[in-house]
Amino acid sequence: MGWLYPYGASRKDIINERCAPWKWEKASGQTIKKCLRGNVLWRVVEVYCQPTGNFERYIACDLLQTDGTGNWGYKDMDESVGPYQTSCPLSYLKGTMVMNKDWRGWVREYHTRKAEKRKARKV
């Protein structure tokens, strides 16, 4: 998928839009956790499927950037596409659907390296 740039949107507008609850004919969803890591918006999204009565949770990743003229846009992804971003909070891995075991491993490695760097700085 490509980038979407709603006309005149600010960064805050994009974040609010991406985190807003939504409802379709047979499903609805809401963001139950969110955080920003630079210009990466991480979310845990809970989806309710009316025909089955099931709830599912998945990790969403929205890259944020400007188009060069001040309009903000986003590129939306989820874990299944194996985003190259690995700054997802570890807590988001718990209780969400596993769509890409390799990507989850990369996220864990990222946090391990980050913790090791913090320890090395303290010494």
Image (cartoon, rainbow, N blue to C red):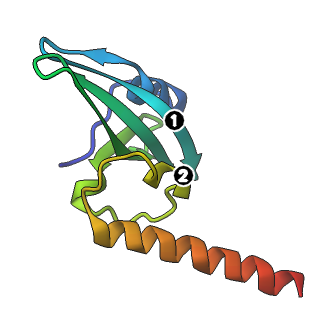
Task: Indicate the position of residue 16 as horizontal and vertical percent values.
Answer: 48, 24
| Left or right of 4 in this view: 118 | right
Task: Indicate the position of residue 24 as horizontal and vertical percent values.
Answer: 18, 15
Number of numbered discs: 2
Q: 48 or 21, which is in the foreground?
A: 48
Q: 94 or 33, which is in the foreground?
A: 94
**Label 1 secondary element:** strand
Residue at the spot 37% in from the left edge and 18% down from the top edge: 21
Q: 33 or 13, which is in the foreground?
A: 33
What is the residue that sits farthest to the right in this orientation?
123
Residue wearing tag 2: 91
**Label 2 secondary element:** helix
Residue wearing tag 1: 33
Q: 108 or 40, which is in the foreground?
A: 108
Residue 103 at least partly seen: yes
Quarter of the figure with residue 29: top left
Q: Amino acid at mark 2?
A: Ser
Callouts 1 and 2 close, C-beta under 8 Å: yes
Label 1 crowd bin: few (<14), some (14–19), many (20+), radius 10 Å: some
Residue at the spot 51% in from the left edge and 35% down from the top edge: 33
